[in-house]
C-alpha cells in the first residue's frame, strides 16, 4: 500500500474513494476514475468502478461489515481493503479509508483526507479479487 491523498475534499464531489483505491493498488490518483463524481447514481458509479477494476485485473466485492461480525465472511489476516462509513465532517455523507483485517477486526491504515480523522465506524468493507490472466484475456 502506498498512501495517496485525496485532492477534492468537498461535500458532494470529494475523491476519497479513488484516493483509497489508488493507495491500495499503488497507482497515481489520476489513474483511477472519479466514478462517484462522474456517475451521480451510486449504482451506476459502482458498475463503472467494477468495469474499470476489470481493466486492471480485478473483480471487486463490497460487504456490510455485519457479515464479518456474524461470521459469514472472514478476510485473510492482514488483507487490505477499503472501509466506508459516516464522514466525520458532513452529515449523511460516506467517507472511505484504507484498512486491513487484523487480529479479528478491521483497522484503518490510511485516511486520504488531510485531517486524518478517519471514520467513526466501519459499515462496508471492500476487497479486490485478482482475475486469472486466462479469464482476463477472453
Image (spheres, grey):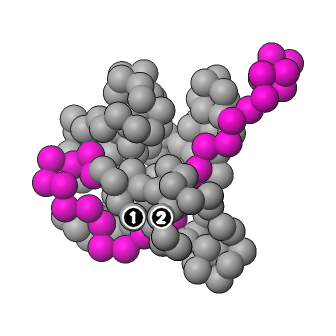
Where 111 sits versus 74, above or below?
A: above
Q: Residue at x 46, y 56 (%)?
A: 100
Where 83 sits versus 73, above or below?
A: above
Residue under label 2, please give it: 102
In which quadrant of the rendered view does residue 71 lie?
A: bottom right
Marks 2 & 1, CB-CB < 8 Å contact: yes
Q: Regarding mark 1 in the picture, which secondary structure is present there?
A: strand
Residue 59 located within the stretch drawn in magenta: no
Q: Residue at x 53, y 43 (%)?
A: 45
Q: Residue at x 52, y 73 (%)?
A: 104
Q: Quadrant of the C terminus?
A: top right
Q: Which mark is residue 61?
A: none
Residue 83: x %, y % from top left: 44, 59
Query: Label 2 neighbourhood size at 10 Å, few (<14), some (14-19), many (20+)?
Result: some
Q: Which mark is residue 107?
A: 1
Residue 134: x %, y % from top left: 84, 21
Where 65 sits versus 9, above or below?
A: below
**Along the horizontal axis of the image, is 85 left or right of 41?**
left
Q: Regarding mark 2 in the picture, which secondary structure is present there?
A: strand
Q: Is residue 21 visible?
A: no
C-alpha distance separating marks 2 and 1: 7 Å
Q: Residue furthest toward the top?
A: 137
| Numbered range of the magenta stretch | 111-138
Q: Is residue 134 visible?
A: yes
Amino acid at each position: 500500500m502506498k498512501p495517496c491523498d485525496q485532492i477534492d475534499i468537498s461535500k458532494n464531489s470529494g475523491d476519497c474513494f479513488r484516493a483509497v483505491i489508488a493507495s491500495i493498488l499503488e497507482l497515481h490518483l489520476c489513474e483511477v476514475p472519479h466514478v462517484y463524481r462522474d456517475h451521480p447514481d451510486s449504482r451506476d458509479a459502482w458498475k463503472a468502478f467494477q468495469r474499470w477494476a476489470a481493466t486492471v485485473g480485478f473483480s471487486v466485492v463490497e460487504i456490510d461489515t455485519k457479515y464479518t461480525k456474524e461470521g459469514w465472511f472472514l478476510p485473510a489476516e492482514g488483507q487490505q481493503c477499503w472501509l466506508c462509513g459516516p464522514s466525520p465532517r458532513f452529515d449523511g455523507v460516506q467517507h472511505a479509508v484504507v484498512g486491513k483485517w487484523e487480529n479479528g477486526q478491521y483497522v484503518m491504515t490510511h485516511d486520504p483526507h488531510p485531517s486524518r480523522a478517519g471514520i467513526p465506524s466501519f459499515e462496508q468493507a471492500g476487497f479486490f479479487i485478482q482475475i486469472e490472466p486466462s479469464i482476463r484475456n477472453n
